Image: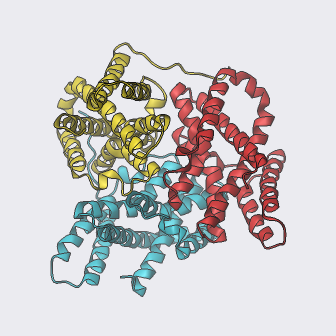
Chain colours: A cyan, B yellow, C red
Amino acid sequence: MYSGFLNLIDILGTFAFAVSGVFSAMERKLDIFGILIISFVTAIGGGTIRDILVGNLPVNWLHNDTAIWVILASALLTMVFGSYFKHLNTFLFLFDALGLGLFTIVGLEIGLRKGFGAGICIALGTISACFGGVLRDVLLNKVPLIFQKEIYALACILGGIAYFMLKRTAINGDVVTGLCIFLIFSIRIIAVKFHLSLPQITVK
Amino acid sequence: MYSGFLNLIDILGTFAFAVSGVFSAMERKLDIFGILIISFVTAIGGGTIRDILVGNLPVNWLHNDTAIWVILASALLTMVFGSYFKHLNTFLFLFDALGLGLFTIVGLEIGLRKGFGAGICIALGTISACFGGVLRDVLLNKVPLIFQKEIYALACILGGIAYFMLKRTAINGDVVTGLCIFLIFSIRIIAVKFHLSLPQITVK
Amino acid sequence: MYSGFLNLIDILGTFAFAVSGVFSAMERKLDIFGILIISFVTAIGGGTIRDILVGNLPVNWLHNDTAIWVILASALLTMVFGSYFKHLNTFLFLFDALGLGLFTIVGLEIGLRKGFGAGICIALGTISACFGGVLRDVLLNKVPLIFQKEIYALACILGGIAYFMLKRTAINGDVVTGLCIFLIFSIRIIAVKFHLSLPQITVK
């Protein structure tokens, strides 16, 4: 599936995740080293947790030079040109939504190759896409954002369900992959555009 | 050892742990997805850390459909009927104490099968039973409760020590298992009933 | 490389890390169990994360009785004689800096034996030496200290770079190991003595 197009999305998604880490870290007034670590954790944390849970060790990023260089470059560029990037918020949001879709499907397909059922595969995809942000928030001493507002993980879960429904049709596998990435991307964008969020439940 | 009785305790313990996660998450005003994650983490977090440390990968819950359905059902039921459950506090506390006992001995016996010594096995049992709650508190941005008050982990440690002492006697293995689960259960209940807690030590 | 001298540094470093964990935990008014856990996590957390990432499972400390006893003894001694230790701050700081150097090089060499490149090995060394403190701070509900001030991780990174530069020379391997531990130790001491810290970067 790693055609040139998906490879590009992967790099753009990693870039967007890393940049979001840098901005979060700068808000907390971390030093350069702290910013770099948060940037890495945001970009590769989800995949790392997935690899550990399924036993894919050493974890992927120890073998993935591209990811490391993309993150390092993203982080350094953002530190230097941060004020300009702020004006690129829309692009970053689009990359982030694309990364969300791609990382979900990558995680899901790793689960499939390990022989897990649909539910576990969707869980692994969602963990891959969302738990980098969870680790980022824990390290920055905050309650994880995705537990509180906005539809983020739900987009991954719906995209994962669509994946298994489409797989049963005659549609070509690569097309299914592409469609589901696009579906997650679209749900995320619609959710943000229309301020959709999951209900909170409080003890009566 | 997984006779029907222990299986039932396992389900009740998982149920109690999941429900406690839901209540903690609702206090923090998380959305439905956040509540579900905290519920899962509370119920399976300790066993997951144990599995990772000893190299039991993929971790247990990826293969354990029962646990996943029990947690999902517990979480959804608690979200819907939460106000009624509040009146069942005593039952939940008893299930939780039973789960504490069972999960400790399960973890300890996994350590034994891996060939570790008594001290490490007791540590693995205590991690299995207590670290789900630690992860829950970290994700909810709190100092873990079990580091601060009440006798919780100590009950697991004492139950683990009793296990190795009783194993040297002529008592049947299954009986030892049952006795130690009951011992941890009892210590926990006595500690809460009489407000027993470990001393704090502060720098003079 | 584990000559008697390095073995001694290992024990002194573990001691210093464990003691620093105890002091941090006492400040947060944890109970005895909480203090013990924080002490363990500070001393072995970094190596544990490294072992998990590279797939060295079961993790090292499950097989390393010496480390466990050193930590247990350090923690108990500090709880009892804590007020005296406060006067030994300088010694503790020196041990801590020595441990920092040793744990970096140990982690780096584990990476080398696994066949990783220089960059990954330096990252693994830095994780081994620094992430116990990160876990300590996360469990105590603080933004990790090493992300915020003082040169700590940078000393490990510079020592790691020196390691790979010196390895290309004719200098004996054990001497390189010793020199790099000493270099990390010295950078750390100079940084604290002259209040050197990494710049913070904030959004303009």
Residue positioned 82% across, 65% down in the render: C172
Which quadrant of the structure image shows residue B14?
top left
Residue positioned 37% across, 36% down in the render: B129
Residue positioned 59% across, 57% down in the render: A26
Using the image, determine if residue A25 lies above or below residue C78: below
- Residue C81 point in image, percent of width and height: 70, 22
- Residue A10 point in image, percent of width and height: 44, 76
**In this rendering, position of residue B120 left or right of residue C150:** left
Q: Please indicate, yes or no, whether residue C147 appears anywhere in the rendered image.
A: no
| Quarter containing the C terminus of chain B | top right
**In this rendering, position of residue B75 left or right of residue C96:** left
What is the count of numbered marks?
A: 0
Residue positioned 41% across, 25% down in the render: B165
Give A82 or A142, whichever is nearer the viewer.
Answer: A142
| Quarter containing the N terminus of chain B | top left
Outermost residue, front side: B170
Which quadrant of the structure image shows residue C162?
bottom right
Give B95 or A176, whichever is nearer the viewer.
Answer: B95
Using the image, determine if residue C152 lies above or below residue C33: below
**In this rendering, position of residue A148 left or right of residue A60:** left
Give A58 or C62, whichever is nearer the viewer.
Answer: C62
- Residue A162 point in image, percent of width and height: 21, 70
Give C174 or C140, whichever is nearer the viewer.
Answer: C174
